[in-house]
Image (cartoon, rainbow, N blue to C red):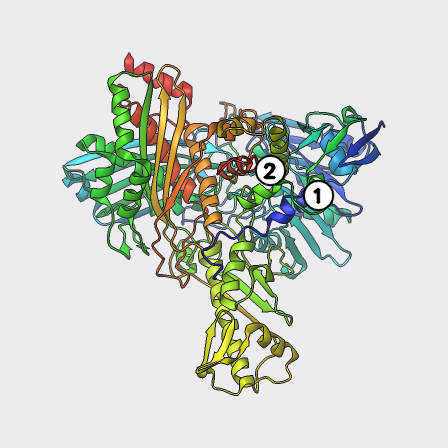
Amino acid sequence: MPRVSVTVNGSPREADVEARTLLVYFLRDSLGLTGTNVGCDTSSCGSCTVLLDGESVKSCTLLAVQADGHEVTTIEGLADNGTFHPVQQAFHEHHALQCGFCTPGMVMAAVSYLNENPKPTEAEVRLSLEGNLCRCTGYHNIVKAILAASGAEV
Amino acid sequence: MTAVGEAVPRKEDTRLLQGEGRYVDNLASTRMVHAYLVRSPYAHAVLKSVDVSAAREAPGVVAAFTGADLADAWPGGLPCFWPVSDDIAMVKHMPLAVDKARFAGDGVAVVVAESRGAAKDAAELVEVDYEPLPAVTDVEAAIAEGAPLLHDDAAGNRAYTWSLVTGEPDKVFADAAVTVKERYRQQRLIPTAMEPRGALCEVDAAGDVTIWATTQGPHIMRTAYTLVLGIPEAKVRVIAPDVGGGFGSKLDVYAEDVIVIALAQRLGRPVKWTEERSEGNLATIHGRDVIQEIELAATGEGKITGVRVRLTAAMGAYLQAVTPGVPLLGAWLYAGCYDVEAYDFHCTGVFTNTTPTDAYRGAGRPEATYAIERAVDALARKVGKDPVEIRKLNFIDSFPADIASGLQIDSGDYHGALDKGLEVLGYDAVRAEQEKRRKAKDAKQLGIGFSTYVEMCGLAPSRILGALRYGAGGWESITIKVLPTGTVQVMSGTTPHGQGHATTFSQIVADRLGVDVADVEFLSGDTAVVPTGMDTYGSRSLPVGGVALYHASEKVVEKARQIAAHQLEVSADDLEYEAGRFSVKGSPDVGMHVKEAAFAAWAAHNLPDGMEPGLEASFIYDPPNFSWPAGCHIAVVEVDTETGDVQLDRYVAVDDVGNVINPMIVDGQVHGGIAQGVAQALWEEAVYDEQGNLLTGSLLNYLVPSAAELPSFDLDRTVTPSPTNPLGVKGVGETGTIASTPAVVNAVIDALAPFGITDIDMPTTPERVWRAIEEAKA
């Protein structure tokens, strides 16, 4: 079995995995980081979105071995000693989560997008979330929260 | 300051936002093994043989079983709790099929292995000799002469017939100046909670069963597992940890749940099963799939006098927990919020070679609302009235209202909600813009669609459920314990899967007992912690469970009052109570807080003679009536008449859900409901081919909308408290889904009025819209 070494949330992590193991299962099963959820089997839902070298990626779309030598940030690595990241804070204040299952992926996608486009319009935020599905919120408050996190008046 | 009515941020978020969700698939037990089901690829096939011997020999495999191997574990099969009529065919539903498979996805064998991957690999080695049979997936085809039969004991594939007739419908229709008759197709939907289903079961040496399941109904499941598997109920513990959305789809007694229990019993090891999404599209219940015929009788000016409805409703291949009852949940609502004299409802339930249907957000009520709201628009066209005018002419406007279908609406203000909706929308300006585009023959036409709805939720008065032959009651249970140090535990029978119970219920208790919201601990979803409950469905948590909480709080306050009176050496009648503190009338400085009474009750050094120690109370509340939320939803769509593309430009929702505990959470419920209802109107449809293959088997082809397809919504509300409960609340979980679908489709039809188009099947995809336009031009 290949050995995979990945820096996860700032710490070096290693594990032996079956070659077919997807990054999301490496995170969940090998490292116990179950904050990254699996919501589909077609790379459609985005629940498993993490940051790979700072950019959002659906962790079901690459093999764990492809992440070898890279840096991964998951939802568990986002808050700073219990203080929410501004996107997490905005999700909390604007009720952008209900069941919470899509939330880690939504938050990571938003963090990545705001790095790329710090002052987006509502339309841009909506388009940026095309790959992340939520069934509870109708997206209304997710969009509002991301705009709020960008400093926009909402 | 009181907590009730405030947008208190959710207590739930702290964990969920940091990746600490305790969803079933995040849990593991030592020595755990993984189950994977082999499912029939055929919609209808005789199982000539099922051979798991090769799978048993595969690497990592612990065991493999056929349906026959496990049949003695569940002699009666899976339960249906709602035998709605005398003529119902209560067909047997085995968790793993034995004789034949009746839908694509019906389980036929199960493989258990040390890893998920090993189980899935080995499942491919299971040899099944299928003899395919002709399949039928359409409800009308299924009851036609010569259709393939699913069950020997369901002649003509008929599951049941059920009627509700009041007044003199035949006379009313004969006397009517105007009638309209419409036929609508409620397409089949896939609920698609973002968390796939799953279950993890441990059985200890004493035979005690603990199962963590993705369920809305841990208490119902405990009873059900006992009924199916014969395990004494007291030995079954069901835990619903964090549950990632349900929308009705996690209320069923699923095959996989009882399979993992049976496997854990046999193997002596914990067994876990996690659904794959594509597997879920086949194996988790579907919703809707009904052909509706609705006929209105009216006066010449458009005053509706009678409603006649004929439904042909798909059950799917088997009857799940409440499958037959879903059409009944809408049966009272086909006259909507309109005052009519006569009512004639008839439903035929039909078996087809498809995934079983069951309650999906709204359950029967979205179907009813769709039919009446579209039919009212059809009537408006026929009598030459604006959709607003026809609605105002027909609204029920005196409450409580005894409606033609036989129930009583608690309260409402239908004119108020519609007026507010028009104001929020700026109706005249949008109509003016529409007129401008029509005159200019703009390629992009505007449509405005209304849905003025009323629904019945807060399920449900137990006596009514009994009269309808439902197998259980509709009460809810709460226990409150004030701990010696003054924090409060709430043990709730209703359990959340995203609705924010912990926050809302804490707000209610905080106000009644004068404690901080943060000092209330909400416990639910574990039958060992909360042994009594009726669970979460039908927008019942607040109007049933929340009201139980109110009454339990009052009992706590009353006991605390006795303790305070005793210790302060005054009569209980001489105490005033405000914000958690009792004070002596006329001597406000002399008093005692509920928290102090709790300590005194715990220490028990100085209680009134005969009083039980401890400050806690339980209340089981059975509602006297449903709650009846209502409101006005308005959609504005832009239809590209060259491509058929429909864009939802604006969406206004004015809902009346009675008093509001947490407006932020209530709005969130409405937002999500709207998105699901809009999705039925515009995008979602489960499609089978003629052989019964599900063509929308994954999220690649079953089109759950993303943020990119939806606008933000304009929400407002009117507040008409329910007089039937002391909180004045009504349910809110399903309103958005119930209201929104007809608003959007009415808007699409309105946009296409210049072409003379009066009907398009849902979802109104670009292809359907384009074809309708081309046919209208031809």
Of badges 2 and 1, the one in the foreground is 1
Q: On the rendered image, what quadrant is the C terminus of chain B found in?
A: top left
Please tell me which residue lies in front, B568 or B687. B568
Tell me the amino acid under the disc marked 2. Cys
Q: Quadrant of residue B297?
A: top left
Residue B473 in view in this figure: no
Total residue callouts: 2
Dot 2 or dot 1, earlier in sequence: 1
Please tell me which residue lies in front, B317 or B280. B280
Mark 1 secondary-structure assignment: loop
Residue hosting label 2: A102
* Residue A79 x/y as whole percent: 68, 42
Residue B486 in view in this figure: yes
Tell me the amino acid under the disc marked 1. Asp
* Residue B287 x/y as whole percent: 47, 37
Q: Residues within 10 Å of mark 2 (few under 14, many from 20)?
A: many
Residue hosting label 1: A80
* Residue B488 x/y as whole percent: 59, 65
* Residue B610 x/y as whole percent: 57, 85
